[in-house]
Image (cartoon, grey):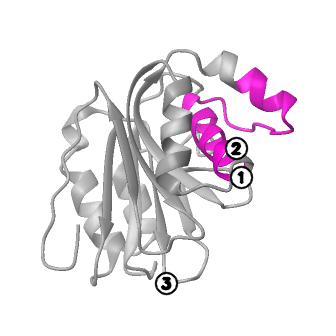
Amino acid sequence: MCGIVGFTGKKQAAPILLDGLSKLEYRGYDSAGIAIRDGEKPAEVIKEKGKLRVLAEMTNQGKAVKGTCGIGHTRWATHGEPSAVNAHPHSSGDGNVIAVHNGIIENYQEQREKLIKKGYSFAPQTDTEVAVKLIDYYFKKYSCTPVEALARAMVRIRGSYALCVMFKDFPGEIYCARKDSPMIIGIADGES
């Protein structure tokens, strides 16, 4: 089973994400990853095949990755083999959109074929990368807000999902969408 966690606030995000993901370990998974934003800098994506402890060791328990906004994921492969390439987070390629996803996108092949015709390429074999690039496509095509891009993409996606998305032009912000999959958003003093 997959699990996703996001954090934005004043504290360093990576240790919080790793802690949150560790609480999901009982569910079973084959890879894990995080994407961290440090202000205006591009997101740093670290992901690896295997247990969460591998990712924790790679990042010195999250201390080696600076930034106060991030998303994380533990993955149980449904589309594509367990690998670092297929691990989440996934990016639009240019880093414009980065996302983690829990659920299954039933029409990902159909959407993938349409995006290939629009000039997108795919390295991973996951349904999540299709969602990320579909959001990116609408964000760029309509020069719209992240919420509008998400809404346009979600109309095209069939299945169940929970998504946490970061946009390059909106540092410190995480956008979420869900259909059928559960999602909890906690709000504290200056952090979510």
Residue at position x 22%, y 44% in the image:
24
- For discs 1 and 3, the disc positioned in front in the rendered view: 1
Disc 2/disc 3 C-alpha distance (Å): 24 Å
x and y percentages locating residue 184 in the rendered image = 18, 46
Q: Which residue is mark 2?
A: 137
Q: Residues within 10 Å of mark 3 (few under 14, many from 20)?
A: some
Residue 41 forms part of the magenta stretch: no
CB contact under 8 Å: marks 2 and 1: yes
What's the residue type where badge 2 is placed? Tyr
Name the magenta segment's main secondary structure: helix
Residue at position x 51%, y 15% in the image:
106
Residue at position x 51%, y 47% in the image:
148
- Of labels 1 and 3, earlier in sequence is 3
CB contact under 8 Å: marks 2 and 3: no
Residue 123 forms part of the magenta stretch: yes
Residue at position x 36%, y 71% in the image:
14
Disc 1/disc 3 C-alpha distance (Å): 22 Å
The C terminus lies in which quarter of the figure?
Answer: bottom left
In the image, residue 23 above or below residue 108: below
- Of labels 2 and 3, earlier in sequence is 3
x and y percentages locating residue 82 in the rendered image = 54, 33
Q: Which residue is mark 3?
A: 39
Q: Which residue is mark 1?
A: 140
In depth, the one of 30 and 14 nearer the eye is: 14
Question: Which residues are the magenta region?
Answer: 112-140
In the rendered structure, the answer to whether residue 21 lies left or right of residue 170 reads left
What's the residue type where badge 1 is placed? Lys
The answer to which image quadrant residue 108 occupies is: top right
x and y percentages locating residue 190 in the rendered image = 20, 79
**Callout 3 secondary element:** loop
What's the residue type where badge 3 is placed? Gly
